[in-house]
């Protein structure tokens, strides 16, 4: 056969075959029309002879077969009408067997056989048994398969099934089953044999052709499944053992796979469940190359669908120990299929796990068992190999998370982390993210330190550099996202009991502390805030009963907080640390813990002094410090003085004059705290403001010198606003005249500034609106109006 | 003119009718000229009774020196054409010399005639039974008329009828075991059997079962054997593998068989063989021939083979 012209030739041959069939069909029709039996048989045999070709691929052969099939239907109708041909069915049965060629003879015999059964002149089982035996004569795989599928086709409606007209009187369901089984067995043998037909180079083509034919074989199983009378007993005692025997003995990869799959698909789930042991027992006996993972996955999927279709079925599953049987079988299959790639192994486990989760969602130990098996399988495998099955392992680990909205259940699985350990750092992180996302999605609250411990053990891939992996390679964006997720996760850890909560925090800290400089800035703040939340809660609860025995006292928490924030110094992240210190200090303030607060402030100042060198950062920091300090009420005079003094000192030492100026006037608030009468030092407020004025002035001059024009008067206006603020607050040191002077000063400044332009309100909106405010206050009347009365504009 | 033509015309019409012609079964007999003729069928020991009618051409008389009817059983070798060997010869004188003016019937009877051999028409030999009516005349020569009839002899079912079972093969290539259910079959019988493939290292293409007839004539050094294949029946299509068994079911009725004639008067024998032929993909043939005996079973005892 010339391969190149193969296709064309085949088409030609097919066309010839069709022409042959058509030609003979015309003659056949003529013979049928004239009720000429002898001619009818002659032309039918000639027509069927076209099916003797060996030159067509199964696909093309099928086309030919279908045409012949249609003609056989006509012939069958003719056979049925005895008065047309005057030949009894018994004689007809002999007559067709006179055909010299075996293939046409058998097609005709099957056709007559169909009529024979219908006539009920013989037992259906005898006719069927004879036919299925006689068909042995065709040993050519393709021709044999089609012949037998013809037999299957014509016999389908004539099986002695329960309720069928052919049942009874010696014909039983068992006869039907045996007939179909035998036909199945023979067809499978032919099908399997096909692979040995051609030369080696055509192997692939052969496999393809075989695949095209598989449904002819599988059809038989379908037919059995359709037999009403095949109940569980018959299935278990006859059908299943025989089919499995055939599947096992045929020793063919394609057949074993296809037929196992077929069995699972065509028979009811109930039968599978009840015969699980037998069915599964066959699996390890199949060839090691058979794709059993797909087969078993299908089975488990079907069973789990079955289980979920009706909750009342669950006891049955338990009764047959479906899980342990499946689990066992999978173990055996994996042991038997030495060459099964790890991907396959895990696909199996994923299916088993899915099955378990769907059928026995309450049996966490089952889930754990599955994971345990995985661990066993994984141990001793190099990570490189495991990495090939990453997707499966992730699926495996994700399954319980998807099932249990509540991650906490998954956390009780002792083998869960052990499986994760086998993942490479990359997939490990992916998995960790899956876990976190699951928690976030379900808003699961993790409430004990034990669980937190487990959880953080699971996501440790995100918490620290695992062996061999460095954060350097990571994309910044990914890294940030991961760490943000971890940060989010921390907010999901909560317990109402402060003691437990503290434990949780400690646990988290234990895990987070090893995160290294890139992670700490992400992980520390949420932890700090979480601790601060706890502090506030403890404070509000234990307001009256301060139990020093309790481990969760604010004092202790603050100690921990110090430690935590201190870790940032190694990063270093001074700005962040500073902010956190200040936050803590404020919390300490709320707890009335002066020494703690003082200490925290000290830490903040130390950071400011030693670590924060960037001037812009300094500006931000100093304002934070001032702001926080202003709100502190816990300090005694001395401590307060020290701190305010420091703060003012820093303010005055800022690099840029405007920054200095603003910091200094901000400091003025440190001496005037509205709700603390003890803390209203008007003089020092004024001092600050005057000092800032000086600085502003200096800044103005500097600008004049360096740039030739003086800067905007913004600073002055800002200071003016401070004046007005304190004036309104009733600082006795701020007199209306001082305000008036300042306004004058600003106006002068403006005039000297704008040589070319006379001052107009439009020139400085800030000043304008400030002045408008003063006017407004004046006109408002009342005590405030009176107070403002002294100011003249 | 008329006179001359008339002189060459048979002077009379001679015909033979059998007494039980209406009841007797007629069978087709192929004549030498290739045409078939329906003739009565007899068995050995039958009484052959009938009438010879001599009907002179109107207006003429037949003058004869005697009329006789002979029953002849003849064997004719085609190699020795024209020479008949009569193994049976019976004569009945029907009339003393005299003259016949009008149609005259002469009844005759051969009682319980021994006709051990069956009518047979083979490739090299023919066995026939004939009634020969001779009206002996001086001049213009005797008038001879032949009436063929066919003899077929039924046999009882053999008391011993073993199956044929045999294992054959070519070492390390092909081993088969075949089984035919009987060694003796009647003419309308069915051969049932099986072929087991014990070892197959050859790619088979198909397998046929042939029915071969071996006709041997003559004896000693002049023995002449002709074999013809009367049936070629495909048993199997494709290549079987070890362990396969292929069913055989061959109906003999469609074929023109005769019973086995082991030794017909030392002149010839006709034997039948089943030839199992396996053809491989390179069209090489492997065969095994096995003699079977065919016999004629009485019609009444013939039973339709169930399935």
Image (cartoon, coloured by chain):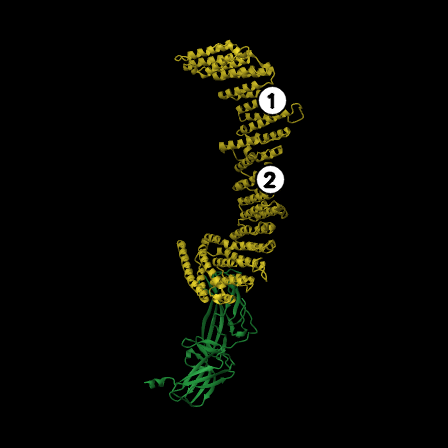
Could you say which is closer to the camera, residue A782 or residue B44?
A782
Could you say which is closer to the camera, residue A216 or residue A26?
A26
Chain of the residue under label 1: A
The answer to whether B238 appears left or right of A556 in the picture is left
Could you say which is closer to the camera, residue A711 or residue A725?
A725
Q: Where's residue B60, x and y in %?
A: 38, 87
Vertical arrangement, residue A490 with respect to residue A34, above or below = above
Mark identifier at residue B116 = none
| Mark 1 to mark 2 CA distance (whole Å) | 43 Å
Q: Quadrant of residue A176?
A: bottom right
**Which residue does the numbered mark 2 point to in the structure image?**
A415
Vertical arrangement, residue B104 with respect to residue B193, above or below = below
Mark 2 secondary-structure assignment: loop
Q: Quadrant of residue A404?
A: top right
Badges 1 and 2, same chain: yes
Mark 1 or mark 2: which comes first in sequence?
2
How many numbered tags mark residues here? 2
Quadrant, the N terminus of chain A: bottom left
Specify the colour of chain A. Answer: yellow
Disc number lying in front (1 or 2): 1
**Which residue does the numbered mark 1 point to in the structure image?**
A588
Mark 1 secondary-structure assignment: helix
Q: Where's residue B253, x and y in %?
A: 49, 70
The chain letter of the green chain reads: B
Q: Where's residue A435, x and y in %?
A: 56, 36
Chain of the residue under label 2: A
Determine whether label 1 and label 2 are within 8 Å by CB: no
Vertical arrangement, residue A86 with respect to residue A718, above or below = below
Vertical arrangement, residue B227 with respect to residue A227, above or below = below
Q: Where's residue A699, x and y in %?
A: 46, 14
Neighbor class of circle 2 (other Cα within 10 Å; few <14, some 14-19, many 20+) is many
């Amino acid at each position: 056969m010339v391969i190149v012209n193969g296709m064309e030739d085949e088409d030609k041959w097919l066309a010839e075959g069709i022409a042959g069939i058509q030609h003979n069909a015309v003659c056949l029709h003529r013979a049928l029309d004239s009720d000429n039996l002898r001619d009818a048989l002659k032309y039918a045999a000639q027509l069927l002879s076209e099916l003797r070709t060996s030159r067509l691929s199964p696909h093309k052969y099928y086309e030919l077969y279908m045409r012949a099939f249609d003609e056989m239907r006509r012939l069958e109708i003719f056979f049925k009408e005895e008065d047309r041909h005057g030949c009894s069915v018994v004689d007809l049965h002999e007559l067709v067997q006179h055909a010299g060629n075996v293939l046409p003879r058998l097609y005709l015999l099957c056709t007559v056989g169909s009529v024979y059964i219908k006539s009920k002149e013989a037992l259906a089982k005898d006719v069927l048994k004879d036919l299925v035996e006689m068909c042995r004569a065709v040993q050519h795989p393709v021709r044999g398969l089609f012949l037998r599928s013809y037999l299957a086709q014509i016999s389908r409606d004539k099986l002695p099934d329960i309720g069928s007209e052919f049942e009874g009187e010696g014909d039983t369901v068992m006869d039907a089953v045996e007939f179909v089984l035998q036909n199945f067995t023979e067809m499978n043998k032919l099908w399997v044999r096909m692979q040995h037909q051609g030369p080696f180079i055509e192997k692939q083509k052969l496999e393809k052709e075989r695949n095209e034919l598989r449904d002819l074989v599988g059809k038989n199983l379908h037919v059995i499944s359709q037999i009403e009378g095949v109940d569980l007993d018959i299935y278990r005692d006859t059908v299943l053992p025989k089919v499995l025997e055939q599947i096992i003995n045929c020793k063919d990869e394609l057949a074993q796979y296809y037929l196992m799959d077929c069995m699972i698909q065509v028979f009811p789930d109930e039968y599978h469940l009840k015969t699980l042991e037998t069915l599964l027992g066959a699996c390890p006996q199949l060839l090691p190359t058979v794709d059993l993972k797909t087969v078993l996955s299908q089975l488990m999927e079907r069973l789990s669908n079955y289980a979920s279709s009706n909750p009342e079925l669950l006891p049955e599953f338990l009764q047959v120990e479906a899980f342990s049987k499946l689990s066992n079988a999978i173990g055996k299959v994996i042991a038997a299929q030495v060459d099964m790639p790890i991907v396959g192994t895990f696909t199996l486990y994923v299916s088993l796990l899915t099955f378990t989760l769907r059928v026995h969602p309450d049996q966490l130990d089952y889930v754990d068992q599955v994971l345990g098996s995985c661990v066993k399988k994984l141990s001793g495998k190099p990570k490189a190999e495991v990495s090939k099955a990453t997707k499966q392992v992730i699926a495996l680990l994700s399954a319980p998370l998807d099932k249990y909205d509540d991650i906490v259940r998954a956390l009780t699985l002792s083998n869960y982390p052990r499986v994760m350990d086998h993942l490479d750092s990359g997939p490990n992180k992916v998995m960790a993210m899956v876990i976190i996302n699951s928690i976030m999605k379900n808003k699961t609250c993790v409430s004990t330190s034990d669980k937190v411990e487990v959880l953080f053990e699971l996501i440790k891939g995100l918490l620290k550099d695992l062996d061999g992996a460095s954060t350097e390679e990571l994309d910044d964006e990914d890294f940030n996202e991961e760490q943000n997720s971890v940060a989010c996760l921390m907010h999901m850890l909560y317990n109402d009991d402060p003691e437990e909560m503290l434990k949780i925090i400690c646990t988290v800290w234990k895990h987070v502390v090893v995160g290294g400089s890139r992670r700490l800035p992400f992980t520390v703040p949420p932890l700090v805030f979480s601790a601060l939340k706890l502090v506030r809660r403890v404070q509000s609860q234990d307001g009256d009963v301060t139990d020093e025995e309790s481990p969760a006292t604010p004092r202790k928490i603050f100690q921990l907080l110090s430690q935590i924030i201190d870790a940032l110094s190694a990063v270093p992240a001074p700005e962040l640390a500073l902010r956190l210190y200040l936050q803590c200090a404020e919390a300490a303030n709320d707890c009335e813990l002066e020494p703690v607060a003082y200490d925290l402030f000290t830490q903040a100042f130390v950071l400011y002094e030693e670590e924060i060198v960037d001037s812009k950062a300094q500006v931000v920091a100093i304002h934070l410090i001032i702001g926080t300090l202003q709100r502190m009420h816990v300090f005694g005079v001395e401590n307060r003085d020290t701190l305010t003094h420091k703060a003012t000192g820093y303010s005055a030492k800022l690099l840029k004059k405007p920054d200095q100026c603003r910091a200094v006037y901000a400091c003025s608030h440190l001496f005037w705290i509205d709700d603390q009468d003890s803390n209203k030092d008007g003089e020092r407020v004024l001092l600050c403001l005057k000092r800032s004025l000086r600085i502003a002035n200096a800044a103005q001059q500097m600008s004049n010198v360096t740039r030739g024009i003086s800067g905007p008067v913004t600073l002055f206006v800002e200071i003016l606003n401070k004046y007005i603020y304190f004036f309104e607050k009733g600082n006795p040191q701020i007199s209306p005249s001082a305000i008036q002077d300042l306004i004058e000063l600003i106006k002068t400044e403006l005039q000297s500034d704008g040589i070319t332009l006379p001052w107009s309100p439009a020139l400085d909106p800030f000043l304008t609106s400030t002045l408008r405010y003063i006017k407004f206050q004046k006109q408002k009347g009342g005590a405030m109006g009176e107070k403002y009365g002294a100011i003249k504009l | 003119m008329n006179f001359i033509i008339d002189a060459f015309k048979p002077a009379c019409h001679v015909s033979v009718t059998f007494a039980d012609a209406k009841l007797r079964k007629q069978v087709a007999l192929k004549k030498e000229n290739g045409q078939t003729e329906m003739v009565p069928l007899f068995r050995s020991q039958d009484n052959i009774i009938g009438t010879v009618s001599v009907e002179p051409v109107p207006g003429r008389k037949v003058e004869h020196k005697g009329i006789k009817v002979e029953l002849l059983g003849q064997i004719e070798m085609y190699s020795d054409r024209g020479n008949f060997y009569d193994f049976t010869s019976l004569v009945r004188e029907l009339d003393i010399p005299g003259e016949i003016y009008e149609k005259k019937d002469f009844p005759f009877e051969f009682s319980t005639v021994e006709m051990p051999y069956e009518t047979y028409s083979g490739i090299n030999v023919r066995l026939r039974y004939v009634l020969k009516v001779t009206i002996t005349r001086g001049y213009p020569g005797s008038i001879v008329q032949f009436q063929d009839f066919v003899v077929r002899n039924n046999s009882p079912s053999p008391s011993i009828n073993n199956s044929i079972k045999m294992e054959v093969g070519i070492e390390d290539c092909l081993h088969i075991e075949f089984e035919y259910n009987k060694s003796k079959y009647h003419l309308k019988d069915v051969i049932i059997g099986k072929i087991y493939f014990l070892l197959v290292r050859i790619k088979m293409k198909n397998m046929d079962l042939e029915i071969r007839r071996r006709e041997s004539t003559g004896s000693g050094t002049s023995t002449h054997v002709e074999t013809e294949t009367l049936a070629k029946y495909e048993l199997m299509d494709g290549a079987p593998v070890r362990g396969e068994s292929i069913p055989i079911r061959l109906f003999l009725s469609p074929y023109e068989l005769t019973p086995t004639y082991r030794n017909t008067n030392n002149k010839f024998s006709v034997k039948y063989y089943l030839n199992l032929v396996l053809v491989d993909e390179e069209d090489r043939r492997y065969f095994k021939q096995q003699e079977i005996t065919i016999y004629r079973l009485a019609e009444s005892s013939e039973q339709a083979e169930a399935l």
